[in-house]
Image: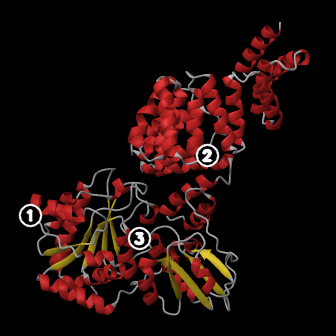
Amino acid sequence: MSSDRLERAERHLADGDAAQAYRLAGDVLSGEPDNPRALLLAGRIERLGGRLDDASARLERAAELAPELAAVHLELATIYRRTRDFERCMDELTLAMHYDPGGVEAHVEMGSVLRQQNDLEGAEAALREAVARAPTDAKALSELGWLLVNAKRHAEALGFLEQAVELNPRDIPGQNNLGYAYVKLEMYERALEVFSRLCERSPAFLLGPRINLGNAFDHNGELEKAERAYESVLRFEPNNFTARWNRAHLLLGRKAFEQGWTDYEYRLQEEGVWQPRLIPFAPWKGEPLEGKTLLLSAEQGLGDQIMFASCVGEVAARAKRLIVECERRLESLFRRSFPGVEIIGSEHELVPPWLRGIGAVDYHLPAGSLPGFFRRQLSSFPAHAGYLQADAASVARWRATLDAIGPGFKVGISWRGGTPVTRHSLRTIDVEELAPILGTPGCTFVSLQYGVGVAEDLARLKQTTGIDVHHWQEAIDDYDQTAALCGALDMTVSVCTAVIHLNGALGRPVWIMVPSAAEWRYGASGEGMPWYPSARLFRQPARGQWAPVIGAVAAALRTQAASGRNSVAQ
């Protein structure tokens, strides 16, 4: 009789009728309080309903009465995982494996727990064991694929995620993860197919796929569609951190600065974007700074720090005392450029050791928040001739070195930008593809490229095209010398990388080869950048099409070189 009731209860639970299932399990327990199967079922329903204490009591009793029930240990493991009692969770999973040697679920759960604890090697071993035991288990395949995505092994992850979705088309998280992997592999059309389908088939309150759809549109250069996707999220959840942060880039890219900077502040809430630091001073919210001390802390990459520094002179004019933290490579350059401002070169420590020596501070602001006060309209961007200053003696030495090469136009060149997580492939051109530029008559080219493999790139260029590009590693290793070399060159041509910001901040002529899906700094359209009046942009007509850009730069450079050095270098 009790067996029949429990079978009916399990069917009800499988059909989504937890209330009826719980009633039937309770009927059994009223007559058989130590029925392990009824305790398991009631405990599972209580766990699903969030009543973890009640669930634990039921399940622990079931484990005492029938330790051989692997499902009981799996349920307890789930509860301990939710309460972050990982040691007991792993014990229960080990017991589940012992009592069900051929089972898969415990291996999958163990992989998930180990991933949660950042033991990616152990997690991968557990999940690969699960897949080996059950090659068509969609959950095991999906978990292994997502683990590999987290390990940035996106190409390897793709096969597992595609197979998991094929086996279980209703798995919304699995489809979301598959689309995410497509984005990371720059397979944007496939990502858009996945996310569009997922959004059509999922309720409006499921925001993750809609955010990812916007992200895929953004990367594919479909900016209006991306903005609409984020706004659909914000209509449902107005303060969604990720949607606000992502939309900020679109707004700033189309020069809607006032709303853009408001959304940009959501980076301070977005996990994975912002790394909180223990800086114990009141945030500056625009209060008067007369007689006050303000600390600007560094954030983001080298180019961002240079760009945000365009506001330093304006805030320094208001404050009695201004302290600016920056990356160590920028320390000398900033100190020379901002006299009267206290410059601290740092390693971006969680607890900055230099805090002990700076004395009283009234306010603190992350540097990326400065433009929200000083660049709220296009007219707020000054028509500057450079706000950073290279060392004059070093510039003179580099100019003499360049003159010794011979006559002609001296042009800096950089062909690789970013990292695998900052759209490296969109910001990189094989150096041989630049031959139409590098072969410009009357021009001598100087490498400003950083990173590994530069010598190999230039040797390959020489072998395949016969073109020589000069490279002085000492000018790359010391950023102050990089600035001086840029100051000595007639101009620079580059992909989107930090050297763009350096030249623009120095007021040096810089031509930028921009991908069709450009970062917000370069704007959504146009040939100029409000940040740097000396910059000129050459944009891809479509994703991957560098040849028209290279041709346009080469033609413009021939004209520029023919017009003479003094028309560019001031």
Q: Which mark is residue 529?
A: 3
N-terminal label among 2 and 3: 2
Q: Secondary structure at mark 1?
A: loop
Residue 444 placement: quadrant: bottom left
568 to the left or right of 77: left
Residue 267: percent from left, percent from top: 59, 61
Name the residue located 17 percent from the left edge and 79 percent from the top edge: 409
**From where the camera sits, is residue 180 visible?**
no
Location of the N terminus (image quadrant): top right
Residue at 41%, 77% (x, y): give it.
329
Secondary element at image label 3: loop
Question: Is the residue marked by circle 2 packed among few (<14), some (14-19), or many (20+) residues within 10 Å?
Answer: some
> Which percent across, then down, holds residue 4?
78, 8
Q: Quadrant of the C terminus?
A: bottom left
- Label disc, if present, on residue 466 of the rendered structure: 1
Mark 3–mark 1 Cα distance, whole angstroms, equals 35 Å
State the CA–CA distance, disc 2 to disc 1.
54 Å
Residue 303 in the image: state x and y as whole percent. Answer: 42, 71
Residue 212 appears in the rendering? yes
Question: Which amino acid is tagged 1?
Answer: Gly
- The secondary element bearing badge 2 is classed as helix
User: Which residue is more in the foreground, 436 or 68?
Assistant: 68
* Numbered circle sitting on residue 232: 2
Q: Are marks 2 and 3 in contact (CB under 8 Å)?
A: no
Determine whether 96 is above or below 569 in the image: above
Report, in whole angstroms, how far the alpha carbon at label 2 lies from the one at label 3.
Answer: 30 Å
Q: Label 3 crowding class (10 Å Cα cut-off): few <14, some 14-19, many 20+?
A: some
